Image: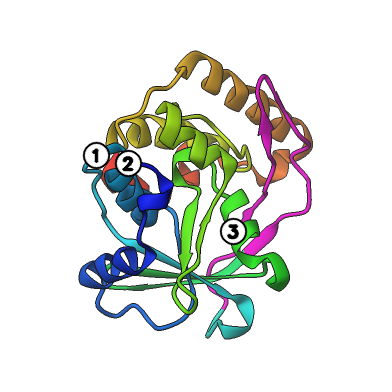
């Protein structure tokens, strides 16, 4: 099968089965949507652990999580500047299996900005709950065709290094770990050079609680 066989209404229905408290609007993106598409196109039963819902910052109820996501596109064997303009997640809310993330992405290109902020190509898929429109990146489409998993964003290199192994296993993908970890090591080196005051003493503090539980 291929992308033309993806029924977004069926994807939304499956998402609602997993997270019944999913609202009628917002942008669901990341692992859950990618896993469902991976099953349809590649026949792989990838695990779904939660559903990530992205909403504009204007709907946030509080500011309790100042985590900066830096969309820095990765070209093969090279990565762009770490300080490219990105978007900020200003608040998150956990409601059972539903994660709400309020962010300051450009409203006109909200969905595209969110997807470009994801660190691994096998995660770059999402669906609009209000319109049913499917959004994917060329890198995600490449994953569906080739099964290759690689880094697309070096904004959180420590976290991405850990997630890379788990994502390759969950999505039954192939990965050139030497190449991808080398890209991340270069990003870490640049981070140490330009943002030393922001680096944690414990490098794994870049992982959130969900990542620690899954590793």
Q: In the drawing, what numbered circle is on residue 43?
A: 1
- Circle 2 sits on which residue? 1
Would residue 89 be seen by someone viewing this image from the given angle?
yes
Instruction: Say if 179 sits above or below 126 in the image.
Output: above
Q: Are marks 2 and 1 in contact (CB under 8 Å)?
A: yes
Mark before the other along the chain sequence, 2 or 3: 2
Taking the spot 44% from the left edge, 75% from the top edge, the residue there is 129
Taking the spot 71% from the left edge, 44% from the top edge, the residue there is 197
Q: In the drawing, what numbered circle is on residue 114?
A: 3
Q: Percent position (x, y) of residue 57?
A: 62, 77
Q: Which residues are magenta?
A: 63-88
State the residue in front, 102 or 29.
29
State the residue in front, 44 or 102.
44
Instruction: Say if 74 sits above or below 66 in the image.
Output: above
Q: Is residue 188 left or right of residue 11?
A: right
Mark 1: few/some/many CA within 10 Å (<14, 14-19, 20+): few
Mark before the other along the chain sequence, 2 or 1: 2
> Under tag 2, what secondary structure?
loop
Taking the spot 36% from the left edge, 37% from the top edge, the residue there is 167
Q: In the drawing, what numbered circle is on residue 5?
A: none
């Amino acid at each position: 099968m291929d992308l033309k066989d993806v029924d977004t209404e069926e994807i939304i229905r499956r998402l609602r089965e997993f997270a019944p408290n999913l609202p009628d609007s917002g942008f669901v993106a990341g692992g859950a949507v990618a896993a469902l598409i991976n099953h349809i196109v590649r026949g792989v039963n990838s695990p779904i652990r939660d559903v990530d819902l992205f909403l504009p910052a204007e709907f946030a109820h509080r500011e309790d999580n100042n985590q900066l996501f830096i969309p820095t596109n990765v070209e093969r064997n090279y990565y762009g500047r770490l300080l490219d303009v990105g978007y900020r997640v200003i608040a998150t809310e956990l409601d059972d299996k539903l994660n709400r993330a309020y962010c300051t992405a450009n409203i006109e290109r909200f969905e595209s900005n969110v997807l470009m902020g994801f660190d691994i190509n096998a995660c770059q898929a999402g669906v609009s709950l209000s319109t049913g429109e499917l959004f994917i990146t060329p890198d995600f489409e490449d994953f569906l065709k080739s099964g290759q998993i690689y880094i697309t964003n070096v904004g959180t290199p420590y976290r991405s290094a850990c997630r890379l192994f788990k994502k390759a296993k969950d999505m039954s993908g192939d990965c050139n770990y030497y190449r991808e970890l080398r890209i991340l090591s270069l990003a870490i080196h640049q981070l140490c050079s330009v943002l030393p005051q922001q680096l944690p003493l414990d490098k794994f503090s870049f992982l959130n609680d969900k990542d620690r539980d899954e590793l």
